[in-house]
Image (spheres, helix red, strand yellow):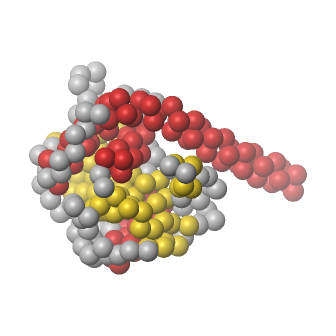
């Protein structure tokens, strides 16, 4: 896995979101990119990443892209695709990028099933800071986030976990995450438009994610067929 950085801001805070439960992380990062003054500064390329792209404002979007906001000194990592099977490699790459930029911290946006039927909440884990959120004391973490936590034991990492309604895109959960980021990083991002803007984005995003799963399933079916034939 190779990363390309056309610009290297000094000591930024990195915020990353990879597709997960309720697509909360994806929606959150996409909203921040759309509502902050950002510039694209790089991307990750790998043959392990599903060959998937999107065209936005007449430009081709890389599957995993780095954006930079100068005002708050933020590097936002947007991912349009899953990286199932290569979580360790991706986590190592993210830590390497963070060290290259001397990042202050990596903030990971995650989601989780609700604990009950009451109002959904936002939690956090951090090896660096205290947040004005409920701290997770016991939890099972999987995927890229788990690999990152294990790889970045000595690097400042904060995970923000939002309870989400279902496997469907949850824009309300994303709005709660933006609100939490406002409080933690002293941002001034109005999260209210997310509730409407995300709904328009959700339909296209879900179609994109379904297409990714279809491509991955086709690859798996082909592999199984070839193994069956060989056997």
Considering only vertical position in the picture, is 1 above or below 35? below
Q: Position of residue 208 (x, y in %)?
A: 57, 41
Residue at the image position 30 percent from the left and 55 percent from the top: 37
Residue at the image position 31 percent from the left and 47 percent from the top: 35
Considering only vertical position in the picture, is 219 above or below 49? above
User: Of 117 and 204, which appears nearest the observer?
Assistant: 204
Which quadrant holds residue 146? bottom left
Residue at the image position 66 percent from the left and 48 percent from the top: 216
Residue at the image position 56 percent from the left and 67 percent from the top: 45
Considering only vertical position in the picture, is 209 above or below 94? above
Q: Position of residue 112 (x, y in %)?
A: 35, 39
Which quadrant holds residue 116? top left
User: Of 146 and 131, which appears nearest the observer?
Assistant: 131
The residue furthest front is 58
The number of discs equals: 0
- Name the image quarter holding the N terminus: bottom right
Image side of residue 221 versus residue 114, left or right: right
User: Of 10 and 152, which appears nearest the observer?
Assistant: 10
Q: Position of residue 44 (x, y in %)?
A: 50, 66
- Residue 167 visible at all: no
User: Of 4 and 46, which appears nearest the observer?
Assistant: 4
Q: Position of residue 23 (x, y in %)?
A: 43, 40
- Name the image quarter holding the C terminus: bottom right
Image side of residue 212 versus residue 68, left or right: right
The residue furthest top is 117
- Residue 57 visible at all: yes
């Amino acid at each position: 896995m190779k990363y390309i950085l056309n610009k290297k801001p000094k000591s930024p805070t990195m915020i990353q979101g990879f597709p997960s439960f309720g697509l909360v992380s994806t929606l959150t990062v996409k909203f921040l990119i759309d509502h902050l003054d950002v510039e694209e500064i790089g991307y990750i390329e790998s043959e392990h990443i599903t060959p998937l792209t999107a065209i936005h404002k007449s430009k081709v979007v890389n599957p995993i892209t780095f954006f930079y906001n100068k005002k708050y000194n933020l590097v936002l990592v947007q991912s349009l695709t899953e990286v199932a099977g290569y979580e360790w490699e991706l986590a190592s790459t993210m830590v390497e990028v963070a060290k290259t930029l001397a990042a202050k911290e990596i903030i990971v946006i995650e989601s989780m099933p609700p604990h009950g039927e009451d109002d959904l909440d936002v939690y956090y884990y951090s090896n660096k800071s205290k947040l004005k959120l409920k701290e997770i004391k016991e939890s099972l973490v999987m995927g890229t986030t788990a690999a990152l936590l294990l790889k970045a034991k000595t690097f400042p990492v904060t995970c923000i976990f939002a309870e989400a309604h279902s496997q469907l895109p949850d824009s309300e959960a994303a709005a709660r995450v933006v609100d939490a980021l406002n409080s933690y990083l002293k941002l001034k991002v109005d999260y209210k438009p997310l509730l409407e803007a995300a709904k328009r984005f959700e339909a296209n995003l879900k179609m994109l994610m379904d297409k990714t799963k279809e491509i991955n399933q086709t690859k798996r079916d082909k592999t199984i067929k070839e193994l069956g034939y060989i056997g």
